[in-house]
Image: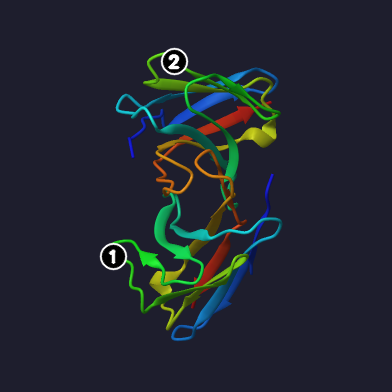
Amino acid sequence: DAKTTQPPSMDCAEGRAANLPCNHSTISGNEYVYWYRQIHSQGPQYIIHGLKNNETNEMASLIITEDRKSSTLILPHATLRDTAVYYCIVRVSGYSTLTFGKGTMLLVSP
Amino acid sequence: GAVVSQHPSWVICKSGTSVKIECRSLDFQATTMFWYRQFPKQSLMLMATSNEGSKATYEQGVEKDKFLINHASLTLSTLTVTSAHPEDSSFYICSAESPGGIDTEAFFGQGTRLTVV
């Protein structure tokens, strides 16, 4: 599976949009982009995933560039409870393993 | 979304004893479950892939005789840490893949904090 690169940490003010970038320049045509987050001392939580089209659900939006070499996770109105480590992962299919990198530690402040 | 339940959420055991951790998919059948381990301030590391009805596949460096995995049904996988030692103290997390083919997502249990004293 392709590797991803994320900034180690980001800050965001409560109520503002949090935009978390991810580079995956070696992504293959059949690899999906997945986002998970892990709140301290909990298991990871699925957020969203996509192949090439932008995706939106009740938690977040996923913007994938046209060349698919990077993506951005958008939390439209961050709250203090969104403070977590966010992982961007690419993988071939639903049956291959998830390889976790170091992720981005997002700190949402009042 | 689908729910994966892990039990216990935390356990303290004496060195040399064995500990069993359960992972259940509550509202779907999971032919494949995964076990991860996470040390403080580190990312999740895959330990093994648990396949229903067959032997688990272990990642390099993970001792299969120490970390026994059983996946006897489509909704339950267990991880037994045998002869636990303090260096086995860690956060253990399981996940199960939702059914549906190629475009699916994995759901995770809440994790088990193991402390070996």
Render colour scheme: rainbow
For label 1, the SS is loop
Q: Residue furthest front?
A: B101
Write down the residue under mark 1.
Answer: B61
Between B47 and A108, the one nearer to me in the picture: B47
- Give the quadrant of the N terminus of chain B: top right
Residue at image position (58%, 45%) is: B100
Instruction: Report the disc number at residue A73.
Output: none
Residue found at the far top of this picture: A66
Q: Is residue B21 above or below residue B83?
A: above
Residue B22 locus on image (x, y percent): 60, 70
Query: The disc labelled 1 sits on which kind of residue?
Result: Gly
Count the marks: how many? 2
Q: Is residue B29 above or below residue B7?
A: above
- Residue occupying image coordinates x 33% and y 29%: A28
Place of residue B32 in the rendered image (x, y in percent of width and height, measured from the top left): 50, 59
Name the amino acid, label 2.
Answer: Thr
Q: Tell me: B60 left or right of A61.
A: left
Circle 2 sits on which residue? Answer: A65
Q: Tags 1 and 2 in contact by the CB under 8 Å rule?
A: no
Q: Which residue: 44% across, 49% down?
A: B41
Point out residue A31 in the picture as x, y percentages from the top left corner: 40, 33
Question: Is disc 2 surrounded by few (<14), some (14 to 19) or many (20+) residues within 10 Å?
Answer: few
Parent chain of label 2? A
Against A73, residue B69 (above or below) is below
Left-right relation of B5 to B30: right
